[in-house]
């Protein structure tokens, strides 16, 4: 039985969700604010923050815990899993969306670059673990490396890469990543 159900809680707030997941409260707050990672809408809103019934949030906690454990295992083992590919694809697509906006938001682009850049090492280590996908992974890992470099060089300023060049590089990788996602979903 999982920790969430063992806890006997009937209600969860941000702090309780973070505690059960072993995550930072700020991270859970960001997920909730952005409605990301599939977090369900709160059952109620109190002055102290959102409130979820156990029946609403515990299934999500189970799925999220499994995903976080998969991601941690990938980081530790350096092997390619569907979770790593999907995470990299989400970060790539987010960066593309930000770069396609009429009025680019440099801070958001910087965060997206940083997020993609964090996956450079795991992607590089994973090359070769999925037959027929070395080129796709190599290109994605290279792009993640460019993103990591850009964020290291600019700490707090605009990315050093020209955004049009960065967009072109991202758009070249998108079809390969899409094919890789399809291949992983079939496996």
Image: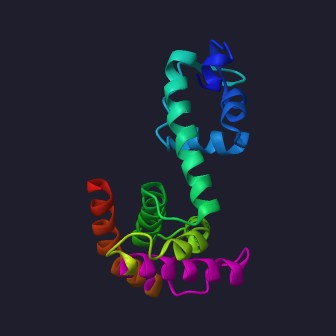
Q: Position of residue 39 (x, y in %)?
A: 51, 35
User: Magenta part mainly helix, strand or loop?
Assistant: helix
* Magenta extent: 135-164
Of 9 and 186, nearer the camera is 186
Q: Is residue 127 above or below residue 22?
A: below
Of 134 and 86, nearer the camera is 134
Which quadrant holds residue 5? top right
Q: Is residue 55 above or below residue 32?
A: above
How many dots with numbers? 0
Quadrant of image for the C terminus: bottom left
Q: Residue at x 57, y 69 (%)?
A: 122
Of 75 and 40, nearer the camera is 75
- The colour scheme is rainbow
Q: Is residue 149 above or below residue 64?
A: below
Q: Is residue 20 above or below residue 128?
A: above
Q: Residue at x 63, y 16 (%)?
A: 11
Q: Position of residue 29 (x, y in %)?
A: 65, 39
Which quadrant holds residue 129? bottom left
Q: Residue at x 32, y 74 (%)?
A: 176
On whether residue 152 falls in the magenta region, the answer is yes
Q: Position of residue 64 (x, y in %)?
A: 54, 39
Q: Residue at x 46, y 39 (%)?
A: 38
Quadrant of image for the N terminus: top right
Q: Position of residue 53 (x, y in %)?
A: 56, 16
Which quadrant holds residue 145? bottom right
């Amino acid at each position: 039985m999982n920790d969430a159900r063992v806890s006997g809680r009937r209600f969860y707030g941000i702090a309780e969700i973070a505690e059960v997941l072993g995550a930072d409260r700020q991270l859970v707050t960001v997920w909730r604010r952005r409605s990301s990672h599939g977090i369900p809408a709160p059952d109620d809103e109190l002055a102290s923050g959102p409130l979820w019934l156990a029946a609403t949030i515990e299934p999500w906690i189970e799925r999220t815990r499994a995903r976080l454990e998969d991601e941690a295992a990938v980081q530790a083992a350096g092997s390619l899993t569907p979770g790593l590919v999907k995470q990299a694809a989400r970060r790539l697509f987010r960066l593309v969306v930000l770069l396609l906006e009429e009025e680019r938001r440099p801070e958001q682009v910087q965060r997206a670059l940083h997020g993609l850049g964090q996956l450079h090492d795991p992607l590089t280590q994973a090359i070769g673990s999925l037959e027929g996908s070395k080129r796709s992974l190599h290109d994605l890992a290279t792009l993640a490396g460019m993103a990591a470099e850009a964020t290291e060089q600019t700490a707090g300023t605009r990315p050093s890469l020209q955004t049009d060049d960065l967009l072109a590089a991202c758009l070249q990788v998108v079809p390969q990543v899409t094919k890789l996602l399809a291949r992983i979903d079939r496996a």
